[in-house]
Amino acid sequence: MIGDVKDTVMELRSLTAGYKKEGILFPLVGPLNISACCGELIAIIGRNGIGKSTLLKTIAGLLKPLEGDVIIKGRKINEFRRSELAETVGYISTEQIKVDSMKVTELVELGRYPYTPWSGRLSAADNEKVLLAMDKTGILDLKERFINELSDGERQKAMIARLIAQDTDILIMDEPVAFLDIKNKYEIIHLLRSLTREKNKTVIFSGHDLSLIMAQSDRIWMIAEGKIYDGSPEDMVLKGFMNKLFDDNDFIFSESDATFRIKKEFKSEVRIIGDGINRLWTEKAVNRAGFVVVNHETSISVTVDRDDEGLYWIYKSDNNESAKLRTVYELIKRLRSLSMKI
Amino acid sequence: MINNNGKYVLSGKGKITLLMLAVLIITVFLFILDIVLGSVSIRLKDIADVLMNKSDSEIYSIIVRFRIPKAVTAFLAGISLSVSGLQLQTIFRNPMAGPYVLGISAGASLGVAVLILGFSDYFTVKSLELLGNWSIAVAAWTGAGFVLIIIMLISLKIKDILAILILGIMLSGGISSVVSIMQYFSSETMLKSYVIWTMGSLGNVSSQQLQVMIVCVSAGLIVSFFSLKVLNAMLIGEVYAGTLGVNIKMARIIIFTGTSLLTGTVTAFCGPIGFIGVAVPHIARMVFKTSDHRVLLPSVILIGGSVMLASDIISQLPGSERVLPVNAVTSLIGIPVVIWAILKTRKYT
């Protein structure tokens, strides 16, 4: 076990998460035995409908466990008083909040709810934290804007600012980067990382952006077949866990570039001569066209190199067809017309 | 606060204080205007004389026995319905919610109908008077609370804003059918006393009834005042409010009790008054540009009171002998605001 017991901030003890409908239990995941440490950025992955949101709601205290316990800082979650839990665990879902006439500041101020007196009045220290949260998420300029007028990315940042202002040790986020563009996705994941590094917060979030998650998270909890596969992103790849994600033999994980592909029957071999980045991108294109790239002598060869006019590709086939092409697009067109003939 | 150009600009708080002061002045002005204007015109000097106890008895009795109680009733009715509307809009997260549109006013009428008509075999018209104003108020609260619980149970299943609105209309329709059936089976004397009650207006409220109203509305406002922080959290929905530490069940019970008190009391003594409750919170949000209940509650109190006073002034048709039903006036003021709010909501969805 890594780290000592003091580091453990949350522990799931034979936890079964699921929901209850008309008295019937629908268990989705579990029993799970796993713990999260201080300062970890943990990504929960799994296919749609497998129970990620249900698990997140259960560990946030919004759903009762069907069985087992969620232990936070050594105490069962149901032993916490409401206000105490609100100071320890924060949560945001995928729900898009629309409130008439609510300003960004007003939304972020709600994060201080557990700390304010009955009147809701914010102290100077509270206001400081609100400003700091808006600064961290880069929305200080938007503080007087109405949340209904924001873009999806800006609104999500405002929601995250509210969560940061709540200043809990554990932050639970259900798909925090869904509907965002790639720049916003990176900014938000980067922000979550900095929370774990600078403030020693534990962030548990779910998502579908594999390459982002593989690159940024400390740890992956992969839900498949009702179980959790746990490890660093690299462990997941090297132990071959990733192919369990979708449980589909035709949809396979490529260890070399951390992406999933639909398995194809390759038509024919192509030898690529060239190196560096030019070779890499040519390989990608040739693969997509349905050919397997080899390094030995074969019927089709492609040479990539540079001359005075820029990049070129020389394409040769065994029936003595040959052409000098200036774009990958043209090359692929050639290869595809060839594969038609085959 | 001084901006870059060296000019004074108002900061958020200063602006709100100034706006609140302006609304307060308008409210006081409308209150005085409501006393002055009517079928018998009264000069401001007369009011001053009344206040200094040196007026002739006729003007004195018009002002003290009739005009002031009516203005106070209008003011209280406006406050109650508007504060109810604000709370309902927040709890249901529905800009179309209000005591009238959700059928809560109808529920209060049902409570009174059950009291007057349902027990017609046991009471005479005389004994009904003995039942007193408190029992009518309690009956109205019960009816209002009953409808609120039904709406809440259904809104847990249906989240769609307009579906809840249609549900409220259905409930109002259903309740008025039940009341009609009860009228059909009740004795003539009871029916008469019920019909007189349904025609209740701001002007018919007796001083005893006004006392009951003042007590109940104050109680409702105190409940609302202590719910301000919770109401702010409820704006972002029950799930998030829960993660902030709000006891959702408790919050619902407290806020619904306040709403039933406010709407029930007004409906018991003034009859159903439409569209004030749904419209005033929108006006307040438009003027104050905030969703913070610590600002919205006082502004809704003042604007709600003002709108009701204005409606009363208009319904008197100053200078003429005729009086319009106040419900018609409030609908004409409220409906355009509601339509505007619907269009605004559509824009964001």
Image (cartoon, coloured by chain):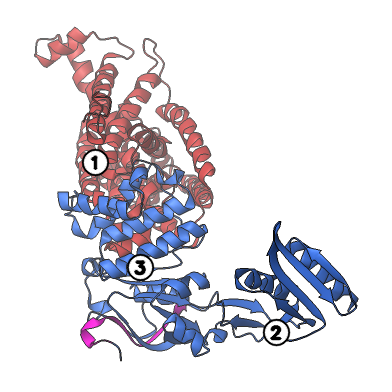
Chain colours: A blue, B red
Region in magenta: A3-23
Instruction: Please give the chain letter of the residue carrying mark 2.
Output: A
Which image quadrant: the N terminus of chain B? top left
Residue occupied by mark 3: A193
Dot 3 falls on a residue whose secondary structure is helix
Q: Main secondary structure of the magenta part?
A: strand
Asked whether the residues under marks 1 and 3 belong to the same chain, the reply is no
| Mark 1 neighbour class, 10 Å CA radius: few under 14, some 14 to 19, many 20 or more | many
Residue most toward the front? Answer: A308
Residue occupied by mark 2: A295
> Of residues B236 and B114, which is closer to you in this image?
B236
Residue occupied by mark 1: B217
| Mark 2 neighbour class, 10 Å CA radius: few under 14, some 14 to 19, many 20 or more | few
Earlier in the chain: of badge 2 and badge 3, it is 3
Instruction: Please give the chain letter of the residue carrying mark 1.
Output: B
Q: CA distance from mark 1 to mark 3?
A: 52 Å
Query: Looking at the picture, does residue A313 appear above or below residue A78?
Result: above
Dot 1 falls on a residue whose secondary structure is helix
Residue B96: x percent and y percent?
46, 44
Query: Looking at the picture, does residue A112 appear above or below residue A215?
Result: above
Image position of A242 (left or right of A199) = right
> Of residues B37 and A166, which is closer to you in this image?
A166
Residue A49, by quadrant, is: bottom right
Dot 2 falls on a residue whose secondary structure is loop
